[in-house]
Amino acid sequence: MVASGSKRSRRARAPIPAPSSPPPPPAPPAPQSPPQLTSLLALLASSVTLALRFASDRDLLLLPSQTLALDPLLLSAARAVSRLLPAFFQLLHALDLPAPAASSSSLALPADHKLGAALFRLAHAAPARAVARRFGLPSPAVAARAFYEVCRAIADRLAMLLDLAAPDRIARAVPGFCALSLPNCCGALGYARFGEAAIAQALVDADGRFLDVSIGWDPEMAPAEILPRTKLYTSQSIVLANAPQGELIGGSVPRYFLGPACCPLLPWLVTPYKHGNATDDLLSKESIFNHVHAHGLQVVKSAFGHVRARWRLLEECWKGECQEALPYVVVAGCLLHNFLIKCGEPMPEEIQGNADADEFVDFEGEKDKEGERIRDVLAAHLSLVSRNQ
């Protein structure tokens, strides 16, 4: 779900000319188009290469302390540029941003310049006026419009990275969760608040890739109210249909998703045992299951944390009309997260976000009998495995 805004049409008034008006002053010269960002990146790569060669050729002319200080900086810059260039060009090609329209001189910017400015604002939470000044754009309004244009293009062009029903998408997720001692699991479901404007629901695989994202929900809604209204809820039967059963000692287990305690226990969504039902014995099957479940559910929390750490703008306070654009920006951040994983870009070392803000009240509704059976089979399996280790 992505929120959409509405626009009010306004009737323009025709200006009444003065009886004897002086000739209009000459129009100011149009701002010069900034240089292509691709050429600047190529120059940057060339400069780093030349700097490395210079330092290597003149190693004997530098003091040891100078060499020790210079070499790590140049090597770090070389590695950063070597990672940046391929990913940037792949993203630019994938988005296929439209050419500047003849009637829209305010956005007559090169596609790579729009993309560079948008990524800078998203990564550094830079205000539109700072982006306009840094990238030589005509005005903050142009910078803001270019930013949202790129976010829309990302949501449209990279949407296939969130296609949960794509062939083998679920099958590829199963081995990762098996490595976490969760047989036949194919995704972890979680929720996060972005500012005070919206709640996001996301399904991720064991590697932190987003499989499904739904955002734009009222921050006052509980996850148990959000889940039945999402596409994931209505399509899960198709996504998980005809999947092989996992045969465990205590019985068979279909493919399922991990769910947090704020969601209902369902045959396809396995939530943890409530603390009141699990004994204080750390070796009980309920305690063992809850421990493994929490470890598996951490992948979705980490995915949200990495998105927030990489795209700082998502942590800003969004007010007024900007709140309507927030869902598109969050989806763009998640899609770019998947794109960078696909390109082999390492995850940010830090994880950003307020864990307390993402906590929700536990679900207190009725229990599903088949869901209880599946959870009990998994708990018995994990208890047996832990005893044999």
Image (tube, rainbow, N blue to C red):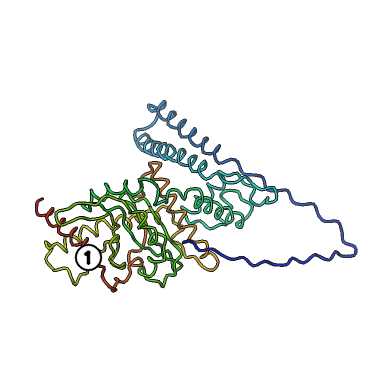
Residue in the image at 31% along x and 68% along y: 262
Instruction: Tell me where residue 12 appears, x and y as whole percent.
Output: 74, 65
Relative to 61, is 274 above or below?
A: below
Looking at the image, residue 370 sits to the left or right of residue 156; the answer is left
User: Which quarter of the figure has residue 386?
Assistant: bottom left
Relative to 7, is 298 above or below?
A: above
Relative to 381, is 226 above or below?
A: below
Numbered circles on residues, count: 1
Residue in the image at 51% along x and 65% along y: 323
Instruction: Tell me where residue 42 appears, x and y as whole percent.
Output: 52, 35
**Between 42 and 65, the one nearer to me in the picture:** 42
Q: Mark 1 — residue?
A: 372
**Between 255 and 327, the one nearer to me in the picture:** 255
Looking at the image, residue 320 sits to the left or right of residue 29; the answer is left
User: Which quarter of the figure has residue 235?
Assistant: bottom left
Residue in the image at 42% along x and 63% along y: 194
**Between 119 and 209, the one nearer to me in the picture:** 209
Instruction: Tell me where residue 368 appears, x and y as whole percent.
Output: 26, 68
